Amino acid sequence: MKKDLISITDYSKEEYLRIMELAADFEQNPNQKLLEGKVVASLFFEPSTRTRLSFETAINRLGGRIIGFSDSNSSSVTKGETLHDTIRMVSNYADLIVMRHPLEGSARYASEVSSVPIINAGDGANQHPTQTLLDMYSIMKTQGRLDNINIFMVGDLKYGRTVHSLLMALSQFENPIFNFIAPDELQMPEEYKIYLREKGIRFFEHREFTDIISEADIVYMTRVQKERFSDPIEYEQVKNVYILRNSMLANTKPNMRILHPLPRVNEIHTDVDKNEKAYYFDQALNGVFAREAIIAHTLSLK
Amino acid sequence: MSDKIKKKLKLKVSAISEGTVIDHIPSENLFKVISILELDKTTNMITFGANLDSEQQGSKAIIKVSNQFFANDDINRIALIAPNAKLNIIRDYEVVEKKVVEVPDQVIGIVKCFNPKCITNNEDVLTSFKVTSKSPLALKCKYCEKITHQHQMVIK
């Protein structure tokens, strides 16, 4: 049976750990010609420069060849071709499909249509599992473990798919503690809190972003997006409350690291960039190793 | 309405010797029930009535199909639009068994996903949901993973 990666919950805990192990191996030795003679389709129905370049770098380092497009304007979608037909056609050409699509559920549907494995590189606001795996790899690398992690998630916790997926994934490990810091309008949805309560996992909700982060192992920042607010005045009120500044890091633990899926706007002040606890740029590099690992696992190359 | 007229009305939907009577269907969903159970394709004798008086629900519809019996899985597919439907299994003019419908664990087709950005609302994809709560109803889309709640439910 083909192994797709559509949703972060498609993987078991053992598979998360396997990806961590493989990513560490690719970090030691990024150029391994495991994809020699293979063709990978990179189908980006909407542009996403960071994700696409990270995937294509991973494919190149594995020695594979790439076909595809970087936005739907340069594909037959403009002629009205359905996703179904595009995937049917491409799955005849390629050994693996990496796809990004603006519609939610498009990746799951593609996996049903395709004869080759699909890796979801983002389907609208739904899932972006490779981001979560690179976040986990970043946590593993900086903390040496995925158990007993005290994580503060800050910003847009309502619509942010990265925080939802990371919450689901870390919940598979021992004793996580979640701290949510968000304005009223952007609170963590009830369904995730119900999930944590059912699993007996501790979580705390905060309105203010102050020195409460002194207990954190990880501070996971997200962007508060203006378009999420119905009232522009409310946006103006909260946008400057959730800014991480270097002065706030004085009492944090030495092992603490700051993650951000990027791009950032103003939620992390540039004075943080020089602090050794700022990890977001290294996190982006980890994306290449994590994606090499996911591809190798998906095609059972290692 | 007098008992006499009621009786007459009842007789219009005539008794059957062998088959299934599906009673207490909301009148407005009669044709959807017919379509879901594919009774529009049957060659068996079928009679139905709509807008009949019902003590329980004000107005109801009833379907009588001769020589046809339904598996529970099939009949449960109408649970979303006819939750109070009752089935009488008829053998030789006698009711030999009564059944009620039950919301299934999985709903395929029938309901639209409420999420306008879901692939099922943008391309010709059969919807598929996992039932996460039966009362009130909550359906989790297999594709976009969003939950459609009872008040958002639209029948295809």
Image (spheres, helix red, strand yellow):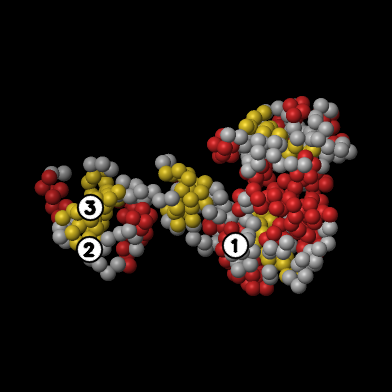
Q: Which residue is mark 3?
A: B97
Q: Quadrant of the N terminus of chain B?
A: top left
Relative to residue B65, is residue A91 depicted above or below? Answer: below
Q: Looking at the picture, how far across and down is residue B109, in whole percent?
A: 45, 58
Please tell me whether mark 1 or mark 3 is closer to you in this view: 3
Relative to residue A209, is residue B143 depicted above or below? Answer: below
Query: Which chain letter goes with mark 3?
Result: B
Q: Could you tell me which residue is drawn at 79 percent across and 55 percent down?
A: A25
Which secondary structure lies at badge 2?
strand
Going by the numbered disc 1, the residue's amino acid type is: Ser
Which secondary structure lies at badge 3?
strand
Q: Could you tell me which residue is drawn at 60 percent across and 68 percent down?
A: A115
Closer to us: A55 or A171: A171
Q: Which residue is mark 1?
A: A111
Q: Which residue is mark 2?
A: B66
Look at the image and tell me whether residue A25 can be seen. Answer: yes
Going by the numbered disc 3, the residue's amino acid type is: Glu
